[in-house]
Image (tube, rainbow, N blue to C red):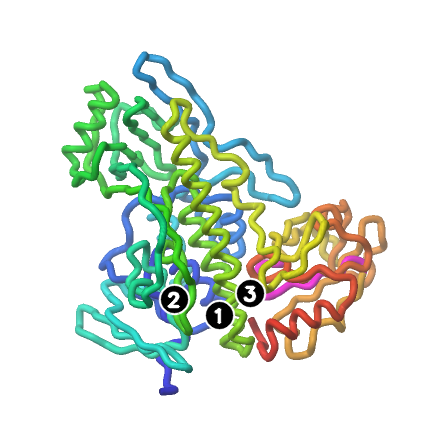
Amino acid sequence: MTDFDTDILIVGAGAAGLTLALDLAHRGVDLMLIERNTTPFAGSRGKGIQPRSLEVFEDLGVLDDLRAVGGAYPPMVTYHPDGRTNRNELHAPHIPNPAEPHGDVLMVPQFQTEAVLRRHLASHGHAPAFGTELTGFTQDAEGVTATLRTGGGERTVRARYLVGTDGGRSFVRHALDIGFPGETLPFHAIVGDMPIAGLSFDLWHRWYTPQTQLALCPLAGTNLFQAIIQVAEEVTPTADLVRTLIRQHTGRDDLVVGAPTWLSTMRANLRLADRYRVGRILIAGDAAHVHPPTGGQGLNTSVQDAYNLGWKLAAVLKGAPDSLLDSYEAERRPIAAEVLHLSARMLAQMGKPEGMRRGRETRELDLTYRGGPLAPAAGAARVQAGDRAPDAPCRAGAGTETRLFTMFQGPHFTLLGYGADVSDIVPPGLTATVKALSVAPQGQATNGFDLSDQAGHIRGGYDLTPGALVLVRPDGHIAALADRPQVIRDWLSQWLAAATQA
């Protein structure tokens, strides 16, 4: 079979699926996004967008809209059984700097994040097909044949690749018989969103005892609180039960708990898929890894899975070697393993009187793909291939203020020549794929250069000396650092090959 209905079939329209769809749409890739549920997710489960994900969303052009519906995290106040209270900031303070422009975690309820992504996806002519369920699939050397159930009956779709972003109970993962080993920790909770009259909206309220706790977090941009209520065993959540438990934990009869907009149960599962790829089928997001939300990593890790995978799928469709897709699992699975360990540590902190404290490791700015298939070299250098590419203020050729992230924005690779001519480094077939920019070092005349490092932030961020070359991937990680053009040409030849527009 060689006739295709679409290039990429994405199964699951949560944060991972929507991010992948938007990234592919930016690249002009034909896609189909389906969702078994008949309506969008209505809850706030993943509400914290970490600084690294803010960078991803800036590149995708949605950050301003997310900021418009989100806000800052409030301080947390803990009420103890003996009447004491203590107040702390959940996130350690982080002041933005030239290399890291986004300091604070942004609170955006998940339903708002997904709504913003859907709006931007619609501007590219795509929308999730809700009420459309994947019921089976087969694959061959050229593509995937999927059977879908819709309100109008069954249909068959032929795609070049299928990506399962269909959650922790992933049909795609189960159908591929991919192992999902891990453990379930002895923690049960009710989680949901609801208005609560009589409770101040400028604090995250937490009632703690050694046996149980209640947390009520005001959701930025709404009139709702997210409630997390620890319970001794799994129960069926109802509005009446939630009201009773809130009254018991707080000891307050004056709080008026409105109708929940969403209720669910939460288990502390720590599980990681054995594989992320089987032939032309891949999994991402919660389909590949699940863990407690205690570290604020879930939605962010899923978004970054999609961001890593999108450019690789697009490149392979344009002729890059199929082995490029193997680098997705090689790079992202170790990250997920670390996230599981972090979430477990944060869950243990949650059970202590003082509560959690999220440090730099939760901001995801230090995530690296060093030592992976796309960045095998390693050494003692402070900045290496595989690392996140730092931002830096600089000036464009006309003297206007700009940033490296502005130069990176879009579906292309970026080649920086620090005090070096890059005009003839990129092979002719890849000039539409790689934006080549020469950078005048600090204190050097700017004539003939595309950018000027007038304050030395590029040099400092990347630890560069004149003559250095930096190739930055579309997902904002460094592909190669070199002092010889042939190193850059070799990387492009190996991983993009015949691709003409990644």
Tag 1, which secondary structure?
Answer: helix
Task: Answer few, some or many: residues within 10 Å of disc 2's Cα (few below 14, many 20 plus, some between 14 and 19).
Answer: many
Q: Quadrant of residue 193?
A: top left
Q: Look at discs 2 and 3 and give the one toward the viewer.
A: 2
- Which residue corresponds to the image point at 38% horizontal and 31% vertical from the top-left? 350
Apparent side of residue 212 relative to residue 68 in the rendered image (left or right) = left
Quarter the N terminus occupies = bottom left
Rendered location of residue 390, percent (x, y): 64, 50
In the rendered view, tell whether residue 313 sits above or below residue 288.
below
Marked residue nearer the N-terminal end (1 or 2): 2
Tag 3, which secondary structure?
Answer: loop
Residue of label 1: 313
Q: Amino acid at mark 1?
A: Leu
Q: Look at discs 3 and 1 and give the one toward the viewer.
A: 1
In the rendered view, tell whether residue 322 sits above or below residue 70.
below
Question: How far is the residue under mark 1 from the one under mark 2?
Answer: 10 Å
Apparent side of residue 54 relative to residue 478 in the rendered image (left or right) = left
- Which residue corresponds to the image point at 54% horizontal and 50% vertical from the top-left? 55
Question: How far is the residue under mark 3 from the one under mark 1?
Answer: 12 Å
Apparent side of residue 320 relative to residue 178 in the rendered image (left or right) = right
Q: Which residues are magenta?
A: 408-419
Marked residue nearer the N-terminal end (3 or 1): 1
Task: Answer few, some or many: residues within 10 Å of disc 1's Cα (few below 14, many 20 plus, some between 14 and 19).
Answer: many
For the residue pair 129 and 365, the one nearer the viewer reads as 365
Quarter the C terminus occupies = bottom right
Rendered location of residue 209, percent (x, y): 30, 22
Rendered location of residue 451, percent (x, y): 74, 57
Residue of label 2: 163
Apparent side of residue 473 relative to residue 125 in the rendered image (left or right) = right
Q: Amino acid at mark 3?
A: Pro
Marked residue nearer the N-terminal end (2 or 3): 2
Q: Which numbered marker is on residue 411? A: 3
